[in-house]
Image: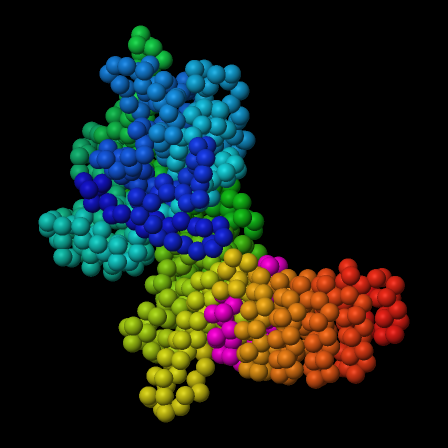
Amino acid sequence: KNSAKAMEKELVTCSPQEKEKIAINRSQIFQIPQRKGLETKVIVVLGKAGMGKSILVQKICQDWSNGEFSEFEFVFWFDCKQISLPEKQYTLKELLLEFFVKPQEGSKEIFDYILQNPAKVLLVFDGFKGLHDHENFPRCSASEPEKDLCSIKELLSALIQKRILNGCTLLFTARPKDKVYQYVSKVDKTIEIVGFSPQQRELYITKYFEGLPGCDSALKLIKEQEYLFSHCYSPVMCKFVCFLCKALLEMGEESLPSTLTEVFLKFFQQKIIPVQTDVTATQDQESLATLAHIAWCLGEKHQSAMKSDLLPSKEVKEFALKYGFFLPFAFPKHSDSEEEEFGSMFSDFVLQNFLCALHLLSAEELRNKSVTKYLSFPSKKKKPYDWLDLVPRFLAGLLFLQDDPYFCSLSNQDGIQPMKKQNKVLKYIRRLQINNLCPERLLELLCCIYETQSNYLLQHMAMRLEPDLSFLDIALTPPDVHVLHSVLKRSRKEFSLDLRNSSIDMQGLKDLVSLKNVTSFRASLSDTVRLWKSLEQAKDYELLKASAEKFILNPFKAKTMKDISNLCDLVEIQEKVANCKQDESGCTSYEIPAIRNLRKLDFALGPACGPQGLLKLVKILAAFPSLQHLDLDALSENGIGDEGAKSLSEVFPTLTSLETLNLSQNKITDVGAEKLATALPSLSSLKTLSLYNNNICDFGAENLAKALPAMTSLRVLEVQYNKITSVGAQQLTNSLRKCPHIKNLVMWNPAIPHGVLEHLQQLDSRISV
């Protein structure tokens, strides 16, 4: 039912050059442009836990079975949680033809064909996280890895090292923080699978309840709890919320829990209580406590699966399987005479996290002093229990639910111990120096406190937050944004937010910038432009203008053609806002502050896109009246050439505030230098001009020398590492005598003899050797 209702989520691939996100279809996953040769191809699919990576690879297998991806004759899919138990070893043949699928006959012939035709083989390893621990990934030491018994890590190492099946295609799924690139030397393609948009969440929920009683009210009920609806961006969370909503609607209830902790507490309640009797209640409670202990022991080892015969009792195994907390699987046999072995794994990472938190709260050996150990928020990025990343949130939530009757029965607590632990947490958070926390830890702290629903703690955080909050390069999920919005809204302070490269969705950006006490913000220009275009289409000019007043752009570095396009869109939006203002008041002088106040612009598109990008940029440069620093070097050789120099010189008269112009390393010759020299005097504020490492010769130097006396604001000229000889150097020196305003002329060139340069420096000390 779930796979039938699962929606195809947007796939995103990141190009190392452009670093722009491009949506792709499933059919394009294995297309690797400009990839030649028959060596092993490696594709990595990234996505947070619960984003649907496993559903995606299952759909790929299904599509292949229906005739798609015809380049592969064999597709093997492995769940890394099942195959990565340290005590298990396999040969390559066992892994392929025993674990995944066992042919009825001809196994040897099929395996030989696979070895001879590796290019026709796709191997999918789902859940790379299950394949590594804190130690280094081992190298395969087996002399014949095709035949010898190896651990799964050794077999995978041999595949990556191209010692076996060289030419096959490897597809790994992993979480963004997994150390994939530490163990895989070369990745041909990286794809990120992202969560549901608000519209996709609504569609999923609608389809889930299609044809069921309460279909009309289910979506309304979920959307009323904005925090839960934000969590529905994750497909697996969306499924849990829908399950609980369905159960509560059937019971006649009209509201959902307000936190994730309460959702999973209710989930366990709905799973277990309807089939419970007085006789089984105590037994179930004991089995759940044992299962929680197992979850914690496995989680500490970064595992979620184990051999079934290692379970402490038959009752625990039956309990876990009965309620769907465990999924069973079988190990391959080394021989027909060997007895078949079975394993069990937790059906879901969220369930394991919740059970871990339940164990930490209920375990007798954990005193109230140690509970804060699992809620630690170190100032550095490293987390002590990163693999169980939801445990702190569930633990904080459970600590503040000691009055819940079902929780008391579930945890077998008398209420005294949780209260002690709760007081310990309150004291710990009050003493915490939150201003020393890195952004990731601050977010984690806010999310944990939100799960407690403690007004005191939420207000405490709102009062202690710094006015300047930076989430630069930190991924902000919809729940993160909701929590941040909730805390900021409580505060009386004014805030400035840096949301650049945070992958914040449009709704989240809109919610945050709409807050009255958020007085300024930085965000990726593409995100901001997308938001403003949406507001313009919705004719919400009031919010458009308000957010435009808060937006900060300076300094701006353009690294892709998309950046230039977004900058053009920004100028276009300003014109439209000005037209709207004109319609209202007849005044056309409105300027978006971010455009008016842009003072520094770095252009770093590189030689491939530089010339084309500059042609677009010069068309809008006049829109930035305060631009003081224009850097066309920016540690990137843009190669704008003479054509670029010509087009740029044509807009010099409009750049009245420009003080620094860096045109270094741009392949400008005498032709471009002549065009520049003609227009440079119109830059009335220019103080520093750098033409370092171009192809300017004596003719270009002569033209620059003629222009210098008219450039009365110029203080520094850099023309070193060009092709200027003694002739050009002499002309520049002669011109320098007429320019008392110039402080420094840097003109060392390989073609100028050192003695000549020293002589010129003696004539004028402003010349740098």
Q: As drawn, which residue projects farthest toward the top?
A: 337
Q: Nearer the viewer, residue 610 or 580?
A: 610
Q: x and y percent of residue 423 in the render?
A: 45, 50
Report the side of 556 relative to 282 (left or right).
right
Residue at image position (23%, 30%) is 322
- Residue range (magenta): 613-637
In the displayed structure, 504 sits above or below 85; it is below
In the displayed structure, 211 sits above or below 337; it is below
In the displayed structure, 236 sits above or below 567; it is above
On-image quarter of the C terminus = bottom right
Residue at image position (81%, 73%) is 730
Q: Nearer the viewer, residue 70 or 130?
A: 70
Residue 179 appears in the rendering: no
Q: x and y percent of residue 703 in the render?
A: 70, 76
Residue at image position (54%, 54%) is 438
Using the rendered view, name the quadrant where residue 645 is placed: bottom right
Q: x and y percent of residue 451 in the render?
A: 37, 52
On-image quarter of the N terminus = top left
Q: x and y percent of residue 59 in the render?
A: 27, 39
Name the colour scheme: rainbow
Residue 89 appears in the rendering: yes
Q: As drawn, which residue projects farthest toward the bottom?
A: 586
Q: How many marks?
A: 0
Q: Is residue 632 magenta?
A: yes
Q: Nearer the viewer, residue 536 or 409?
A: 536
Residue at image position (45%, 38%) is 36
Q: Is residue 372 magenta?
A: no
